Amino acid sequence: MKKFRFLALCLSIAGIFSNTKAAERVVVDYVGGASVMKANHVVVLQTSTYKYGMAEYIYLQSEVGAGGTISKVFFYQDLATLYTFTPVTVYLGTTNRVTLGTSSSDWVTTGLTSVYSGSIPCVVGWNTITLGTSFAYDGTNNLVVLIDNDWGYSVSSANNPKWVYQGTATTRHMYKTSSGNISTATPGTGSRDLQIAAFKIDIAAAGPDAPTIGTATGACDAGLTVTWTDNSGDETGFIIYRNGSNIGSAAANATNYVDNPPFTTIGPYTYKVWATNASGSNASGVCTGTASIDPTAPTSPTATGACSQVTVSWTDASDNETGFIVYRNGAALATLGAGVTNYANTSLTTAGPYTYVVYASNSCGSNVSGVCTGTASVTPTAPSGATATGACNQITVSWTDASSNETAFIIYRNAANIGSVAPNATSYANTSLTTAGPYT
């Protein structure tokens, strides 16, 4: 009986420890074309004046994920440098703050633990920093990363480490350069940057193995289907995050999730999937997708008349149209490319009025603007049926008004201008003649 109890205890302990898994976890991913290189970050050695640098970041709990023991951190670099920087000290901590504040001296300086002191490698790709002291992340608060460079040696700025930054604006990065050593307790005035470095951690966390992220794709107005590979046999479900927010869940053994709010903009949308059970949760990397939806209708249409034409203008309110179709008086008039915001309806022979609408179109459908009406300025139609009737000392010229847009009639006699009459007039009396003519 005692042997049996001992064996049961050992199996129980082994089960507990087997539920703790060390794995790399992407916090903010490197995305090639969307990333940017910046000089003012992490290790900053720009000139002979600035030989010391410090940078601090806040990574949100929704980015970092479940708690566990962090043994490594990783930054991404696009360009190799000639130098390995040392000494560099890395500090980790937690905070409930989601920003480094509105002040350029608003650092997080308390509750930080020195977890690494040594050199920073500078190679293309993910640069690994193996911590000298592991850090227990609580999985509840946001993660603070502070890197202090005390090398004190000047190099060309072309050889500085340049960590890759994502284009999404944040307020979670502070940096400072100095000609002398910077105190981590009282760094003083630094500079805030609106972008944050691509970052990974190696963390031993309880819970099921993290899924491997797949793709986020979709058909017209059908949302985006997020796929993943289920790497665990003990999850109770999956939790799906879009752009850092929990949007839903899937059952155990699921390998996809349809996200269809429905979308009103194409995105892009970034997804992360967590495998979860009673012991904890672990996250996949990220994938990005773009929704296929009808384009938004153009707004603020106007129709402005000029000589023999009307120019139709509108505001492009969509970011996914493949073109525009202009209709006049209910009939298709012209098909235009994406991004176009006006069309000149030329060679008009009548004044109108003309009624226009504009459709934004793509493969998923089209949506129409409001209505606008314009009138062209065109040459009036010549009068017809002109006659000249003589009387005592005068000739009366008569005609039929064939136009609706004249501003006057001008009468010529023998090729010379002799007078004019108002719009819609149909006769003119040429009086006080002293000779019989003839008059043309």
Image: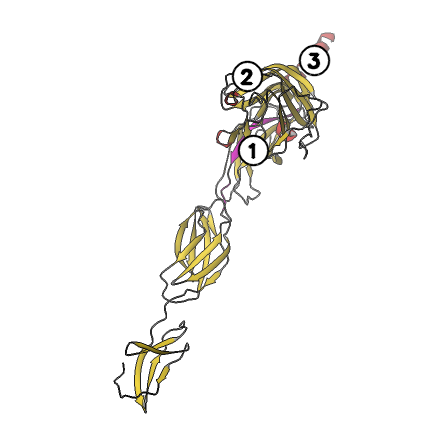
Mark 1 sits on what residue?
Answer: 271
Numbered label attached to residue 260: none
- Is 405 one of the magenta-colored residues? no
Q: Amino acid at mark 3?
A: Ala
Q: Is residue 293 left or right of residue 273?
A: left
Residue 69 screen position, x and y as percent: 66, 19
Q: Amino acid at mark 2?
A: Pro
Q: Quadrant of the N terminus?
A: top right
Say which of marks 1 and 3 sits in front: 1
On the question of residue 408 being in view, the answer is: yes
Q: Quadrant of the C terminus?
A: bottom left
Q: Is residue 314 left or right of residue 177?
A: left
Determine the residue located farthest toward the left in the rendered image: 438
Numbered label attached to residue 121: 2
**Distance CA(mark 2)–CA(mark 3):** 47 Å
Q: How is the image coloured?
A: secondary structure
317 versus 289 height, above or below = below
Label 1: few (<14), some (14–19) or many (≥20) C-alpha neighbours in 10 Å: many
326 versus 157 height, above or below = below
